[in-house]
């Protein structure tokens, strides 16, 4: 058995896949405390939302295989941290995350969540509807006129940079 505060390590034989409106997950982990009774898997998204699914635990060599299913609709677009809830009520984190966004492949990511996060991208400049209209009008002009308009635009933008 592992230290209660330490997440359970996930073996490379673990997987997740879509099956008829649900996500099936199989985890092979070591260090699960022995104890009879029902077991559940808890998925939490870090925003206070959590889901619980009944789990089936079977011996697998020196490890155990944990298998559970969860409805696809209940997952949304979040990354879900997986924990094992034993029959005694203790919750043991599993070192894996489940990604199951609609229209994307399902992914079971072993290992802890990354500590660093990329900063959000800079917001894109939104063009006004007048700008969009001007672009549509210029596109309809004959080629020599479009070329003259582009040259004038380039000259004005270079002049703006010099000031």
Image (cartoon, rainbow, N blue to C red):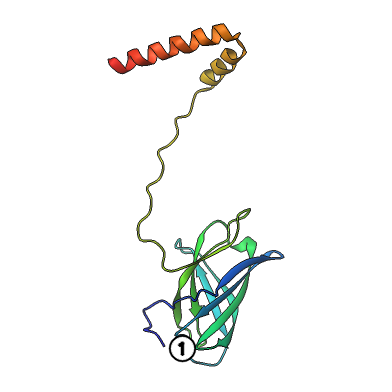
Asked if residue 21 lies left or right of residue 80, the reply is right
**Residue farthest right in this picture:** 20
Snapshot quadrant of residue 20: bottom right
Which quarter of the figure is the N terminus placed in? bottom left
In the picture shown, does residue 119 fall above or below 155? below
User: Picture coordinates of residue 28 (x, y %)?
Assistant: 53, 79
Residue occupied by mark 1: 33
Q: Residue at the spot x=39%, y=11% of the render?
A: 155
Asked if residue 49 lies left or right of residue 160, the reply is right
Q: Residue at the spot x=50%, y=7% of the render?
A: 148
Asked if residue 77 lies left or right of residue 3, the reply is right
User: What secondary structure is marked by label 1?
Assistant: loop
Snapshot quadrant of residue 138: top right
User: Picture coordinates of residue 95 (x, y %)?
Assistant: 44, 72
Tell which of 21 and 12 is nearer to you: 12
User: Picture coordinates of residue 106 (x, y %)?
Assistant: 59, 61
Tell which of 111 and 101 is nearer to you: 111
Which quarter of the figure is the C terminus placed in? top left
User: Picture coordinates of residue 121 (x, y %)?
Assistant: 41, 42
In the picture shown, does residue 87 fall above or below 158? below
């Amino acid at each position: 058995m592992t230290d209660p505060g330490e997440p359970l390590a996930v073996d490379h034989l673990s997987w997740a896949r879509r099956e008829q409106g649900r996500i099936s997950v199989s985890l092979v982990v070591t260090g699960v405390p022995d104890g009879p009774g029902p077991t559940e898997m808890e998925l939490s998204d870090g925003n206070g939302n959590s889901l619980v699914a009944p789990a089936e635990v079977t011996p697998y060599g020196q490890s155990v295989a944990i298998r559970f299913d969860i409805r696809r609709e209940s997952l949304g677009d979040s990354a879900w941290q997986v924990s094992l809830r034993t029959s005694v009520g203790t919750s043991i984190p599993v070192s894996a995350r489940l990604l199951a966004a609609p229209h994307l492949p399902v992914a079971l990511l072993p290992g802890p969540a990354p500590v660093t996060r990329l900063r959000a991208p800079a917001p894109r400049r939104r063009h006004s509807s007048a700008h969009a209209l001007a672009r549509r009008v210029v596109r309809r002009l004959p080629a020599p006129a479009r070329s003259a308009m582009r040259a004038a635009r380039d000259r004005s933008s270079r002049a703006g940079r010099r000031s």
